[in-house]
Amino acid sequence: MIFNIQKLATFILIIFFSIACSKNENPIPDPPEPQKPQYSKGLFICNEGNFMYGNASLSYYNIETQTITNQIFFTTNNAPLGDVCQSMNIIDGKGYVVVNNSGKVQVIDTTTFKYCGTITGLNSPRYIEKIDNNKLYITDLYSPIISIIDPATLTKKGEINVGRSTEMMARVDNYIYTTSWSFQNKVYKIDTRTDSVIDSLEVTMQPNSIVADKFNNIWVLSDGGYAGTPAGQERATLTRIKTNTFTIDYIYELPTDESSPTKLCTDGLKENLYFINGAWGGSVQMGGICKVTDIDSTSPKVELIIPEKGRLFYGLGVDPRSSEIYISDAIDFTQKGVVYRYSNKGELVHQFQADLIPGYFCFK
């Protein structure tokens, strides 16, 4: 009996010292956290989601590995992005995601996707541009003003009263050029030093997108409006504006009244232009992705390089490094859309599924 008690005491001491050593001298390391994806060179995709459903989302495509990660804002921050993800711009290392129907801009870290803040007090924001280190402009669909934002505090510090709604922006020197799209036909010239509209110019009905080229010309794409509306319909056009005189010096008419072109953009060197030529609910002559070359000549060349072929082309972006072309197919606006990646010669490189209604691309 005594022998058994001694053996038991010895066993207890061994266990005690074993536990003590394991806790204090040689701790067992915690298992490593799962490796997180490294997000460096890539593409953000703004998925609009359905209007009034609050199901907008943000996706990220790794260009080098050809992998897509959807719902990155929700997964990272455990919160919804909002209602209708309209556009995105990367400014000083942060991603400014414009959420149109929620009336806000969500700001994220472009590497970790973590939430950094929100710009509120907006009506129906559309696009955001950096003016200088202390000033951002945000256009608005349902408001006659452009909001001036302090990036340090993410608060509004002023307004530019344009008098009409404003859409996309393009910059040349100290001037911002912006279009008024909804049943309007104006391009406005804004002096960024005084935050004031100094001139306007009439173009074809409903100018929906605008870019600046390497020659400091401004190009404006107008869809022409809609038949049966009070504003009426005109033939859609692509217009070149000389910024030194703020006058139109070239107009290209789309081939048919059914053409409804959108999403004008440039390649990386700003030497060529691209746009979607589509028609809601049907096919159209030269339907698909059109490319514009010889843009500084008196007769630029416009050609179809990627036919739509029954798809519903909705978003368009061109990689500023490689000039590869990214196109989204919204399909039927109720299922997840597809993104096609083409070479700058129009050869298919990759295709993948994004989220609901991918409509805007932002390259990192």
Image (spheres, helix red, strand yellow):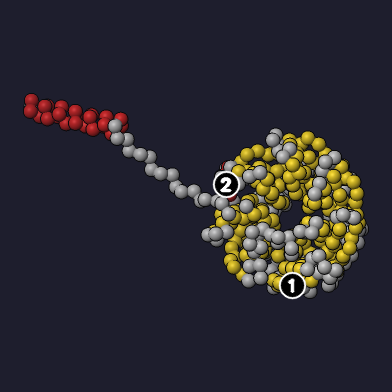
Q: Secondary structure at mark 2?
A: loop
Q: Secondary structure at mark 1?
A: strand
Q: Position of residue 275 (x, y in %)?
A: 75, 64
**What amino acid is labelled 1 in the image?**
Leu
Residue 321 appears in the figure: yes
Query: Which residue has dot 1 on it?
Result: 304
User: Callout 1 environment at 10 Å: few (<14), some (14 to 19), or many (20+)?
Assistant: some
Q: Are marks 2 and 1 in contact (CB under 8 Å)?
A: no
**What amino acid is labelled 2 in the image?**
Thr
Q: Earlier in the sequence, mark 2 or mark 1?
A: 2
Residue appearing at x 90%, y 58% in the figure: 247
Quadrant in the picture for the N terminus: top left
User: Callout 2 environment at 10 Å: few (<14), some (14 to 19), or many (20+)?
Assistant: some
User: Gap between marks 2 and 1, in whole Å?
Assistant: 36 Å
Disc number at residue 111? 2
**Which residue occupies the foreground of this view, 49 or 260?**
260
**Which residue occupies the foreground of this view, 160 or 76?**
160
Q: Position of residue 100 (x, y in %)?
A: 74, 48
Residue appearing at x 23%, y 32% in the figure: 18
Q: State which quadrant residue 208 falls in.
A: bottom right
| Residue sitting farthest toward the top | 2
Residue appearing at x 58%, y 49% in the figure: 72
Q: Position of residue 284 (x, y in %)?
A: 78, 72
In this picture, residue 150 sits left or right of residue 45: right
Q: State which quadrant residue 5 falls in.
A: top left
Disc number at residue 219? none
